[in-house]
Amino acid sequence: MIQSESDAQKRDEYIQHLMQLPNQKWMEIIGQTHQNVEFLKYQDVIWTVDNILQV
């Protein structure tokens, strides 16, 4: 759907909006990892990282 938008600026806005939550979650995970690298071993964190990387 985004690709069908002819206005490049609007396409960029749509992509930024869609990526807002994954980017926020990624930053939260990185922040937690700086405090404790063991955080990356939690199953829900692994699942979230996997989903973000698929985007």
Image (tube, grey):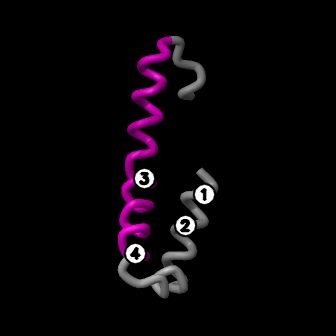
Q: Mark 1 points at which residue?
A: 53
Task: From the image, state whether disc 4 or disc 1 is nearer to you.
Answer: 4
Q: Distance between the residues labelled 3 and 4?
A: 17 Å
Q: What residue type is labelled 4?
A: His
Residue that appears at 48% across and 24% down: 11
- Quadrant of the drawing holding the N terminus: top right
Q: Check the image and name the residue furthest to the front.
A: 34
Q: Is residue 34 above or below residue 36?
A: above
Residue density around tag 2, few if under 14, some if 14–19, many if 20 or more, within 10 Å: some
Q: Which amino acid does label 3 sit on?
A: Asn
**Residue 7's x, y, as percent?**
47, 12
Q: Mark 2 points at which residue?
A: 49
Task: From the image, state whether disc 2 or disc 4 is nearer to you.
Answer: 4
Q: Mark 3 points at which residue?
A: 23
Residue density around tag 3, few if under 14, some if 14–19, many if 20 or more, within 10 Å: few
Q: How far apart are marks 1 and 2 (CA)?
A: 6 Å
Q: Check the image and name the residue furthest to the top.
A: 6
Q: What stretch is highlighted in magenta?
A: 7-33
Quadrant in the rendering for residue 10: top left
Tag 3 secondary structure: helix
Q: Earlier in the sequence, mark 2 or mark 3?
A: 3
Q: Earlier in the sequence, mark 2 or mark 4?
A: 4
Residue that appears at 37% across and 75% down: 32
Residue that appears at 44% across and 42% down: 18
